[in-house]
């Protein structure tokens, strides 16, 4: 069965995930806002989204994550 979600949070989550992989630490706020918009239905997506801001902070060498 094919499922397509048409709200703004899944594309923002995917965009943030890609930007983290490219080493863009500026995507942390986008990821945090996407996390705030999650409804808790998609546990796998939410768990990945919870890891990405940490990865972005490590890439950006933010002092708060050391």
Image (cartoon, helix red, strand yellow):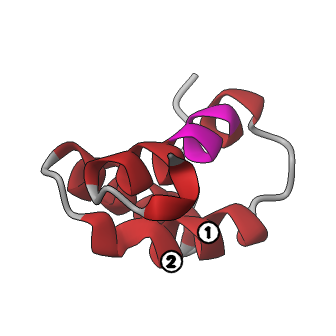
Q: Position of residue 63 (x, y in %)?
A: 46, 61
Q: Nearer the viewer, residue 39 or 17?
A: 17
Q: Residue 29 has which mark?
A: 2
Residue that carries the numbered disc 1 in the rendered image: 32
Which residue is at the front of the view, 63 or 51?
Answer: 63
Residue at (67, 33) in percent of width and height:
47
The N terminus sits in image quarter? top right
Answer with left or right where residue 63 lies relative to residue 36: left
Q: Is residue 53 magenta?
A: no
The part of the image, by quadrant, that contains residue 43 is: top right
Q: Residue furthest left?
A: 22
Q: Are marks 1 and 2 in contact (CB under 8 Å)?
A: yes
Q: Residue furthest right?
A: 40
Q: Secondary structure at mark 1?
A: helix
Q: Residue 35 at what x, y percent from top left? A: 68, 62
Q: Is residue 41 left or right of residue 47?
A: right
* Range shown magenta: 47-51
3 is higher (above) or lower (below) than 17 = above
Residue visible at 37% across and 47% down? Answer: 58
State how far apart marks 1 and 2 are (Cα): 5 Å
């Amino acid at each position: 069965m094919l499922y397509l979600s048409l709200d703004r949070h899944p594309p923002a989550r995917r965009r943030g995930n890609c930007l983290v992989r490219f080493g863009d630490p500026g995507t942390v706020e986008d990821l945090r806002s996407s996390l705030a918009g999650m409804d808790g239905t998609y546990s796998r997506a939410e768990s990945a989204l919870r890891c990405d801001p940490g990865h972005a902070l490590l890439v950006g060498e933010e002092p708060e994550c050391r």
